[in-house]
């Protein structure tokens, strides 16, 4: 019975450490991305023709 409890404790510790590690890595990546994409406000690098935005994908009027 003690072995089962020990295994569950080890699994819980692994889960908690993995979750913390994930959040730390995501925070670091977010900061790195913010440094390199400082002046980007979510604009696309190209513009679509007006009729494409309305749902017509042929590009014809």
Image: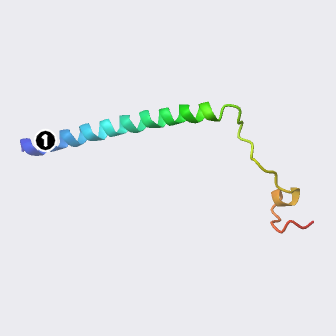
Q: Which residue is drawn at 75% across and 47% down?
A: 45
Q: Is residue 60 above or below residue 32?
A: below
Q: How many marks?
A: 1
Q: In this view, does 18 lie above or below 53?
A: above
Q: In which quarter of the image is the N terminus?
A: top left
Q: Quadrant of the C terminus?
A: bottom right
Q: Which residue is drawn at 87% across and 60% down?
A: 51
Q: In this view, does 54 lie above or below 10?
A: below
Compared across the picture, whether 52 is left or right of 44 comes to right
Q: Which residue lies furthest to the front in this view?
A: 36
**Rendering coords of residue 14 (x, y %):** 26, 40
Compared across the picture, whether 10 is left or right of 49 comes to left
* Residue named by callout 1: 5
Looking at the image, which is closer to me, 19 or 39? 39
**Rendering coords of residue 30 (x, y %):** 54, 35
**Rendering coords of residue 29 (x, y %):** 51, 36
Q: Which residue lies furthest to the left in this view?
A: 1
**Rendering coords of residue 25 (x, y %):** 44, 36
Q: Residue at x 42, y 33 (%)?
A: 24
* Label 1 element class: helix
Q: Which residue lies furthest to the right in this view?
A: 61
Quarter assignment of residue 60: bottom right
Q: Which residue is drawn at 25% across and 37% down?
A: 13
Looking at the image, which is closer to me, 35 or 44? 35
Q: Quick one: label 1, few (<14), some, or many (20+) residues within 10 Å?
A: few
Q: What colour-coding does the image apply?
A: rainbow
């Amino acid at each position: 019975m003690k072995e089962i409890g020990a295994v569950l404790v080890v699994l819980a510790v692994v889960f908690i450490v993995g979750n913390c590690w994930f959040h730390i890595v995501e925070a670091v990546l977010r900061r790195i991305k913010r440094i390199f994409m400082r002046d980007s406000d979510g604009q696309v690098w190209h513009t679509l023709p007006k009729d494409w935005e309305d749902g017509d994908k042929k590009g014809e009027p």
